[in-house]
Image (cartoon, rainbow, N blue to C red):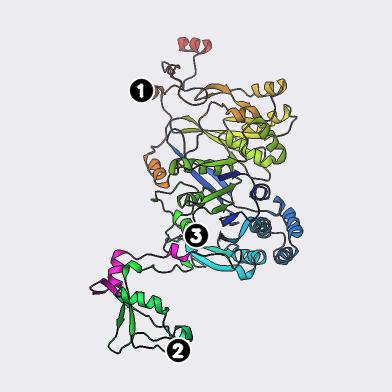
């Protein structure tokens, strides 16, 4: 069964993936580029916005020390290699990245079959260090290729004088689990186009077009006494024929053996037997995903399907298991499904799980798979909060339609929500998550101050248990806000039970990834914003009725627009001033 896991891939690998059960591993981990990557998504009203997908920054304090200790316990030889690197790099962000990657690569070696393959996608930021790590884990003798992929055909320019060549390639390090690992080069050969076949096979006889090819071994191939035999009165030199006698007779019977004027034999090669050209270690024939690509979903670092299809076809067969422990937007999963492989995807970002499920629904509607790691009941939610508070935070924030903050100081902001307040208008909510069992009114009070400080529209406080009366009172003191589903408390409290049943905040936040082309067109259609007048609003058609959860409610009448809703209702004092004026 195909599996999609939400959680830290290190824990998933240890607890869920059996030893020697995977045929092919492809991983495209963050490169430690210090960049923050956003995903383009479509809001429920058709406008486009961005949401942070992940922050590609690794820090020593985020667990590198414990990773080094785990490596020491797992394999002393690998630990010594990491120690040597640490002696050079110190407790730097790069060393933290290598430590966190190494402990995962050790687990990946454990789950890989003795005939399996691993492809690690990286860039020059750390590729040379990663190769040292991979050599120590898989053995230098099992290194097969350093593949260079041309990921950009239009390097970025700059108004400043450049001090280096523009970077335009990625590196893919290909390792085998052992010398028994197969490689299916015929599955990925570059086939010739019809025009190229005509140009190559430029001769013709009664059997059709052909081109001359060798049937004798060259001197550089060495002597082969077993292939030296007489045929049709011709005996080759000591290096012999290219085929055995029985095969040579078959070639001759098919009309594919020719003799030159000098009496030397030649083989006629036919277009139907053309296997295509072998694929080398420079992949400049797979274009990157540009703004016009149909497969583009707006996810940062998305790789083309053709790239993953080549890797999967070269190192696996239908029915084999493909694992991507950093599955991101699910390109490896997508390619594996198309090529009839079983697959396992893992990602620690709840947003990635949402994107993959949306991708499968759109592109692979017949695919069957199971999602694990996402709580399906209140007990599971509480268990996740106890075992891994950070993963619980990511899931909880995602359940309310927001994006989670990364590890480290958050200044009271565990997540943010962008929601709809009207056509082309958006609001912002601050999310605070407290996964402890005993929570009082103080964190609610803190959230109110953070909402004010951040100048946000509302706050969402997530906790495990039902709020106490004091917590409800504190939230109520935050005031009220007008939302698409009606008036609500400005500070809303959501429990673990609410997260499972489906939180009802009265806002619209549904994720739906879109192409960059669609986003650009939507951006061009946007008009300069201006505050609408009451008269403008009167001329607008009535809004469709909303249910409390943001969907249509058939039994709800449209909201009346008889009064100018952007004008404060007149008070008695204002009426008296108007009469005096």
Question: Residue 168, how many percent across, how many down?
Answer: 48, 63
- Left or right of 388 on screen, residue 324: left
In the picture of the structure, the residue carrying the numbered disc 3 is: 311
Chain-order first, disc 3 or disc 1: 3
Of 345 and 479, nearer the camera is 345
Q: CA distance from mark 1 to mark 2?
A: 95 Å
* Residue pictured at 38% horizontal, 67% vertical: 276
- Left or right of 259 on screen, residue 454: right
Asked whether the viewer can see residue 494, the reply is no
Q: CA distance from mark 3 to mark 1?
A: 57 Å
* Residue pictured at 27% horizontal, 69% vertical: 198
* Residue pictured at 44% horizontal, 63% vertical: 188
In the picture of the structure, the residue carrying the numbered disc 2 is: 238
Chain-order first, disc 1 or disc 2: 2
In the picture of the structure, the residue carrying the numbered disc 1 is: 539
Q: Secondary structure at mark 3?
A: helix
The answer to whether residue 403 is above or below residue 160 is above
């Amino acid at each position: 069964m195909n599996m999609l896991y939400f959680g830290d891939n290190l824990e998933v690998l240890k607890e869920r993936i059996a030893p020697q059960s995977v045929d092919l591993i492809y991983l495209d981990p963050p490169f430690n580029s210090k960049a923050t990557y956003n995903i383009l998504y479509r809001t429920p009203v058709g406008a486009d916005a961005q949401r942070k997908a992940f922050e590609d920054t690794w820090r020593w304090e985020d667990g590198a020390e414990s990773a080094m200790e785990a490596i020491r316990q797992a394999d002393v030889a690998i630990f010594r290699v990491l120690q040597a690197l640490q002696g050079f790099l110190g407790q730097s962000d790069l060393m933290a990245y290598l430590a966190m990657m190494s402990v995962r690569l050790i687990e990946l070696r454990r789950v890989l079959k003795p005939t399996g393959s691993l492809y690690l996608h990286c860039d020059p930021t750390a590729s040379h260090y990663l190769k040292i790590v991979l050599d120590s884990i898989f053995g230098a003798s099992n290194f097969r290729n350093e593949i260079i992929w041309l990921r950009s055909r239009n390097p970025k320019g700059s108004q400043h004088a450049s001090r280096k060549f523009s970077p335009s390639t990625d590196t893919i390090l290909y390792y085998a689990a052992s010398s028994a690992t197969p490689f299916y080069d015929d599955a990925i050969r570059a086939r010739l186009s019809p025009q190229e076949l005509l140009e190559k096979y430029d001769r013709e006889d009664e059997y059709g077009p052909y081109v001359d090819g060798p049937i004798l071994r060259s001197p550089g191939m060495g002597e082969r006494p077993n292939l030296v035999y007489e045929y049709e009165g011709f005996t080759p030199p000591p290096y012999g024929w290219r085929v055995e006698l029985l095969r040579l007779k078959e070639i001759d019977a098919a009309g594919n053996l020719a003799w030159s004027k000098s009496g030397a034999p030649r083989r006629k090669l036919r277009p139907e037997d053309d296997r295509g050209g072998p694929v080398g270690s420079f992949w400049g024939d797979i274009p990157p995903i540009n703004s016009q690509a149909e497969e583009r979903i707006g996810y940062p670092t998305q790789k083309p399907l053709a790239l993953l299809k080549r890797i999967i076809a070269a190192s696996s067969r239908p029915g084999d298991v493909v694992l991507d422990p950093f599955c991101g937007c699910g390109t490896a999963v997508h390619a594996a499904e198309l090529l009839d492989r079983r697959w396992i995807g893992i990602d620690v970002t709840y947003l990635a799980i949402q994107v993959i499920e949306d991708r499968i629904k759109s592109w692979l509607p017949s695919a069957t798979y199971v999602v694990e790691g996402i709580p399906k009941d209140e007990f599971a939610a509480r268990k996740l909060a106890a075992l891994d508070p950070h993963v619980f935070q990511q899931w909880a924030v995602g359940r309310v339609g927001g994006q989670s903050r990364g590890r480290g100081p958050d200044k009271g902001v565990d997540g943010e929500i962008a929601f709809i307040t009207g056509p082309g208008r958006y609001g912002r909510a601050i999310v605070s998550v407290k996964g402890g069992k005993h929570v009082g009114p103080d964190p609610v009070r803190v959230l109110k101050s953070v909402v004010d400080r951040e100048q946000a529209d509302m706050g969402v406080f997530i906790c495990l248990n039902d709020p106490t009366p004091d917590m409800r009172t504190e939230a109520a003191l935050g005031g009220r806000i007008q939302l698409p589903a009606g008036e609500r408390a400005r500070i809303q409290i959501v429990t673990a039970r609410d997260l499972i049943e489906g939180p009802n905040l009265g806002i619209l936040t549904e994720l739906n990834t879109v192409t960059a082309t669609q986003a650009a067109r939507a951006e061009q259609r946007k008009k300069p914003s201006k505050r609408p007048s009451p008269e403008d609003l009167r001329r607008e058609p009535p809004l469709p009725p909303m249910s409390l959860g943001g969907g249509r409610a058939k039994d709800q009448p449209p909201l009346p627009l008889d009064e100018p809703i952007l004008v404060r209702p007149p008070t008695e004092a204002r009426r008296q001033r108007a009469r005096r004026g």
